[in-house]
Amino acid sequence: MLIRECTAADVERVEEAYPTGAHRRHAQTVERQQTGECTFLVAWDGEESLGHGEVVWQGCKTTEVRATYPECPEINGLRVYRAEMRGRGIGTALIRSAEDRARERGFQWIGLGVADDNPSAARLYERLGYDAGIRYTAAWSYEDDAGVKHVIEDPRTFMVRDLTT
C-alpha cells in the first residue's frame, strides 16, 4: 500500500472507487490542495484507490474547536471505501501519513473529529494516541443530486495527538 497526495490525474479513479456524484467533491479537494489549504491523501494498492483523508492546515472550521486548539491542523473526511477492507491498516496508514506531514511542517498537534455514532473510529484513534478534547457540534450542508439542500448537525468530540511524543 502506498499513501500519496492525490493529483488531478487521480481524481477519476478516486471517483470510481468512492463516487461523489455531480458535485465531484474529490476534484474540489484537489483544487483546495493546489491553493495550499489542505493535503488530500489517498491510499493506493497499485492502481486501485482504497481510501482517503484530508489534512486541513488551518484546523477545524468550528469556532470553539479552533479557539481551544489554535495551530492544530485537522484530519478530515477519513474514509476506507469498502467495508471488507476496514481493519486492515488503511485508516492507520492514512493517519500516520497525515501526522508525518504535519510534523514536517512544524506542528506540535494534530486533531480530528469523531462522531458520537462512530465508537469504532474513536477506539482506533485512542489506540493511535489521540485523547478526547472538547465536545462540539459540526454543522454543514450539502445539496444532493436532485438539488435538495440538506443541513446536518453532528455531535462529536475533537480528539488531539501531541506529535512531539
Image (cartoon, rainbow, N blue to C red):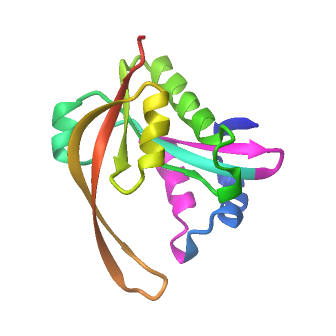
Locate the C terminus and report the quarter of the image it occupies.
Answer: top left
Residue that appears at 62% across and 33% down: 93
Q: Vertical placement of 140 versus 4: above or below?
A: below
Does residue 27 show up magenta in the picture?
A: yes
In terms of image quadrants, where is residue 151? Answer: bottom left
Q: Is residue 130 left or right of residue 18?
A: left
> What stretch of residues is rendered in magenta?
22-48
Does residue 66 show up magenta in the picture?
A: no
Q: Is residue 76 visible?
A: no
Q: Vertical placement of 97 versus 15: above or below?
A: above
Expressed as whole percent of the image width and height from the top left, the position of residue 63 reads: 17, 45
Locate the N terminus and report the quarter of the image it occupies.
Answer: top right
Residue that appears at 48% across and 47% down: 120
Q: Is residue 1 left or right of residue 153?
A: right
Q: Vertical placement of 101 versus 40: above or below?
A: above
Residue farthest to the top, as pictured: 165
Expressed as whole percent of the image width and height from the top left, the position of residue 160 reads: 34, 30
In terms of image quadrants, where is residue 87? Answer: top right
In terms of image quadrants, where is residue 97? Answer: top right
Residue farthest to the right, as pictured: 46
Residue that appears at 36% across and 18% down: 108
Expressed as whole percent of the image width and height from the top left, the position of residue 116 reads: 33, 53
Q: Is residue 101 visible?
A: yes
Residue that appears at 44% across and 80% down: 144
Expressed as whole percent of the image width and height from the top left, the position of residue 109 reads: 35, 23
Q: Is residue 36 left or right of residue 21?
A: left
